């Protein structure tokens, strides 16, 4: 990642550009030339070590093409990719539901360094006791662009401030909240639901909250009506800014949520829809000024953890919360706890395809998690 003190160089693999319309004779020569340039750049660096944390054939091929004499990955990885590694780490079931994927990757990194140290006959220093996630340096223009979005510019309107801090500790799985009770249904056109005093969080006044509702799997997406209910409860509890984020593919979902919340509010300066309006650097800047992030199991949710500031609450459907939940002491995972969960399937395996692990997950459970958190940090 550019401007990251932990990274010396970034070599971009433009996968979509290189593989799109690959057999077109008009562009084939250009694509082959670009692939050759990529492979030449990789091998020219004379890397000592390549780590394949993805465990796919495409990632293994790049590790092999780097020319690194030591190539490390997970044993039994998919698509036969392990065959291109010189050394592999056996972690048992990589998709097992109880070991966090961050810990798996830390173990792979440790194994890779130990393997290289043996080859070079050097002694390693001890690993740091606390995990940190180094992020790129944020230029002042990034923060300025974000503030433009949030200060009445063409993209969005409104104002507010927030505070909070936190750390992510190594080896700590996110706390989990279980519920199997039926939900209180609501559509964006209905009146705001009644939230009991025990559910309404009293600690969110003047806080900044980010919602990340969308992701690629239908079995990881909480219904829009639930997000509307959650957003209304938070705004009515006094948050200063409620910001909805997502990519272009999430636009229909996030807009319906935004309209469902905003249409029922008298104060129109609190809710923002920044879907597809922020780049990666602005998203990092946003998380660094945010107190609470609630999201699906998706990349931006984990980026919020790396920002090392907000309370991060993940709403889980098909994926395992102990493996895929927000990492560290500021992470929380909420799930319904039905018998087939987690199934790790992109499509619901129930006969009625109801995705009841999400449709039966109460908004009140998420509110209880937020209400119980220490946001004073």
Image (cartoon, rainbow, N blue to C red):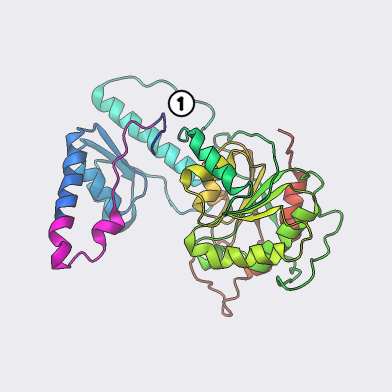
Q: Residue 70's image quarter?
A: top left
**Farthest bottom residue in view:** 352
Name the spot of residue 278 as percent of width and height, x first. Answer: 51, 50
Classify 72 as above or below 25. Answer: above
- Using the image as rendered, state which of residue 22 and residue 47 is in the foreground: 22
Name the spot of residue 289 as percent of width and height, x first. Answer: 62, 39
Q: Residue 296's image quarter?
A: bottom right
Q: Residues within 10 Å of mark 1 (few under 14, many from 20)?
A: few
Q: Do we see residue 323 in this rendering?
A: no
Classify 199 as above or below 352. Answer: above
Task: State the residue at coordinates (41%, 45%).
Answer: 91
Quadrant in which the N terminus appears: top left
Name the spot of residue 195 as percent of width and height, x first. Answer: 82, 60
Classify 195 as above or below 209. Answer: below
Task: State the residue at coordinates (73%, 46%).
Answer: 240
* Left or right of residue 336, residue 49 in this image: left
**Picture mark count:** 1
Task: State the residue at coordinates (62%, 37%).
Answer: 309
* Left or right of residue 94, residue 132 in this image: right
Name the spot of residue 222 as percent of width and height, x first. Answer: 62, 64
Task: State the residue at coordinates (16%, 42%).
Answer: 40
- Using the image as rendered, state which of residue 145 and residue 255 is in the foreground: 145
Q: Is residue 204 magenta?
A: no
Quadrant in which the C terminus appears: top right
Q: Which residue is mark 1?
A: 127
Please report the bounds of the magenta region as a residue range: 7-31
SS category of the residue bearing label 1: loop
């Amino acid at each position: 990642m550019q401007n990251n003190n932990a990274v010396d160089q970034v070599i971009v693999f433009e996968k979509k550009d290189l593989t799109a319309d690959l057999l077109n004779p008009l562009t084939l020569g250009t694509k082959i030339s670009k692939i050759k340039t990529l492979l030449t750049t990789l091998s020219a660096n004379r890397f000592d070590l390549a780590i394949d944390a993805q465990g796919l054939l495409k990632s293994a091929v790049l590790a092999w093409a780097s020319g690194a004499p030591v190539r490390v990955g997970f044993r039994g990885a998919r698509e036969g990719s392990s065959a291109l590694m010189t050394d592999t780490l056996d972690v048992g079931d990589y998709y097992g539901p109880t070991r966090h994927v961050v810990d798996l990757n830390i173990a792979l990194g440790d194994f890779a360094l130990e393997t290289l140290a043996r080859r070079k006959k050097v002694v390693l220093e001890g690993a740091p006791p606390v995990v940190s996630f180094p992020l790129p340096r944020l230029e002042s223009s990034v923060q300025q662009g974000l503030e433009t979005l949030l200060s009445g510019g063409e993209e969005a309107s409104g104002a507010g401030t927030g505070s909070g801090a936190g750390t992510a500790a190594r080896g700590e799985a996110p706390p989990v909240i279980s519920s199997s009770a039926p939900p209180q249904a609501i559509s964006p056109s209905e009146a705001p639901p009644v939230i009991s005093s025990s559910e309404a969080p009293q600690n969110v006044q003047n806080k900044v909250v980010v919602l990340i509702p969308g992701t690629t799997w239908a079995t990881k997406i909480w219904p829009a009506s639930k997000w509307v209910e959650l957003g209304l409860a938070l705004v009515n509890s006094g948050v200063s800014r409620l910001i909805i984020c997502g990519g272009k593919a999430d636009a229909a979902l996030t807009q319906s949520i935004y309209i469902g919340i905003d249409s029922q509010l008298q104060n129109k300066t609190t809710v923002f829809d920044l879907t597809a309006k922020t780049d990666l650097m602005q998203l990092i800047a946003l998380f660094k000024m945010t107190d609470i992030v609630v999201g699906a199991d998706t990349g931006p949710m984990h980026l919020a953890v790396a920002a090392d500031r907000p309370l991060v609450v993940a709403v889980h459907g098909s994926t395992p919360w102990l493996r895929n939940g927000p990492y560290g002491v500021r992470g929380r995972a909420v799930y319904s706890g039905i018998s087939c969960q987690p199934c790790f399937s992109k499509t619901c395996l129930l006969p009625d395809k109801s995705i009841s692990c999400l449709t039966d997950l109460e908004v009140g459970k998420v509110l209880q998690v937020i209400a119980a958190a220490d946001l004073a940090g």
